[in-house]
Amino acid sequence: MTSKILTSILRNHLTKKPNLLRRQPLSTAAAAELSDPQNHEETTAGITMKGVKISGRPLYLDVQATSPVDPRVLDAMLPFYLSQYGNPHSRTHFYGWESDNAVEHARSQVASLINASPKEIVFTSGATESNNISIKGVLHFYKEKKKHVITTQTEHKCVLDSCRHLQQEGVGALYLRRRPRIRVEPQMNGGGQERGIRSGTLPTPLVVGMGAACEVAMKEMEYDEKRISALQQRLLNGITDKLDGVVVNGSMERRYVGNLNLSFAYVEGESLLMGLKEVAVSSGSACTSASLEPSYVLRALGVEEDMAHTSIRFGIGRFTTEEEIDRAVHLTVHQVKKLREMSPLYEMVEEGINIKDIQWSQH
Amino acid sequence: MAAATTSSPSPSQILSLYRSFIRVARQFPDYNIREYTKRRAIDAFRQNAKLSEPSSISEAFSFGKSQLDVAKRQAVVYSLYVPPLPSVMDLPNKPF
C-alpha cells in the first residue's frame, strides 16, 4: 500500500507537465504534489471503455441512481472500519458496547430527521428490503383479517411486485409506527436482531454513515434545496431557450428539485444517451435503466410511447456545480441539434407536415 | 467535539478560520468536493456574518473549527485515492 502511494506520488512528480498546471494558484507546494488532479499520465491519452474514448471522468448528473458519499459521512464511518470493529450485538466486551452505542446514536439521528422515536427505526439493507418488509410483512401478518393493498402505478418496482430486482446499497432504514402499533411478519429469520423484525448482524460502519448522512441532511436541507432548485431551473431554462420540442415529464410544481426528466421530440433516446458521453445521465427511472424498455413510470404518467423513448433523467445533487449545469446544457443542445439534422421526421415537421397524420402502414 | 469557549473569537481568529477553509478546499483532488467545500465555507461565513449574539458567534466558531478538522482529514484521504482519470471539468483542454 505504502509503496503504491509512493509510486503514485513519484509518477505525479515525473509526469508533471507545464501545460497541465492548474490555472488557479495553489497555496502550498506540498498540496500540489499530493493532490493536483491534473497530474495524470492518462490526462493527455485518456482511456477507451466500451468502445468510447474517454478523456476525463464525465460530469455526474445521475444522482438518482447513486450519489457521492459526503466527506463528512465518510469521516464518521472510517473509525468503524479501522479500530472500532466490534459486533454491535456482542454483549460481553468493550468492542461490542462501543459499536452498540454508535448504532443507537445513528438510530436517533435517523429518527430525529423524520420526527420519529428511535424505537420506530429498524435498520435494513436498503429501500428494497424496507419495502418488502412493510408490504409483504404487513400482508402476511394480517392475512387472516384483511387482504387488500392499495398502491399506485408510479411506485418503485420492488413495491409493485415481489421484487426479483435487487439493487441494494448496503444499508437502509424502515420506519414502523409504534402508536397505534403496526406489526409485520419478519422476512428474514435468525438471531433476532432489530427486535426480530430484521435478523442479521448490523454493519456498524454503514449504519453510522446513514446516521451521519441524516444529520448532515437535517443541517443542510434548506441550503441544499435552495441551491439545487436554482440549478434545476438553470438547466431547464438553458435547454428550452435553445431547443423546441422539449417536454418535461411529470409535474414541474410537484417535483423533487433534484430531478429533471425531459423528452426530446424527434430524437432517438439511445443515440442521445450515447452521444452524451461527457455527461453521466440515465433514461427513465433508476430501476429499469438496464433495459431499453421505456420506463413504466413514464407510461403511467401518461407520457406517449415515442416521447417516453427519448427521455433523459437529469439528477442534480449537493455537489453539482453551476459550471456543470452549463456544460450539460451546451452538450445536450449540441447533441439534440445534431441528431435532429439527421432526422427525416424533424425535416418533415419543419416543412409543416403533421407526423400524426402520416399513414405508416405498408402491404 | 465542540469545545465550549466562553469568550467570543476575535475578528482575526475568524478570518484565519475562513482562510484555512479556503486553503484546505483547494487540496481536494475531486472537482466536486473541492468546489463544494469552498462554496459551502464562503456561504456559511457570509450567513454567520449577520450574527450579533456573542454566544451564537462562539457556537458558530467552534462548529466551524470542528468542520475544518473534518475537511483537513478528508483532504488527506481523498488525496490518497485519486482516480486514474481526472474530471472533465478539470481538463486543461476541454473536449467540447
Image (cartoon, rainbow, N blue to C red):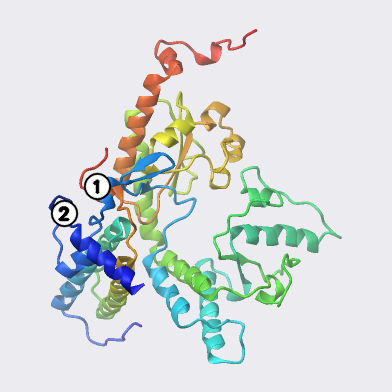
To which quarter of the image does residue A171 belong? bottom right
Decide which of A7, A306 is in the foreground and name it.
A7
Quadrant of the rendering where the C terminus of chain A is positioned: top right
The answer to whether one can see residue A301 in this image is yes
The reply to whether label 1 and label 2 mark residues of one chain is yes
Name the residue at the top extreme.
A363
Q: Residue A44 carries which label?
A: 1
To which quarter of the image does residue B79 belong? bottom left
Q: Mark 1 lies on which chain?
A: A
Say if A312 sits above or below A336 in the image.
below
Q: Which residue is drawn at 43% across and 49% down?
A: A258
Quadrant of the rendering where the N terminus of chain A is positioned: bottom left
Q: In this view, does A79 lie to the left or right of A170?
A: left
Q: Which chain carries label 2?
A: A
Q: Which residue is drawn at 50% across and 36% down?
A: A249
Decide which of B16, A230 is in the foreground and name it.
B16
Residue A263, x across and y down, in percent? 47, 32
Neighbours of disc 1 within 10 Å: few (<14), some (14-19), many (20+): some
Residue A194, x across and y down, in percent? 65, 75
Contact check, label 1 and label 2, Cβ < 8 Å? yes
Say if A334 sits above or below A284 in the image.
above
Instruction: Name the kind of residue labelled 2 in the image.
Output: Lys
**Which residue in the protein does label 2 denote?**
A17
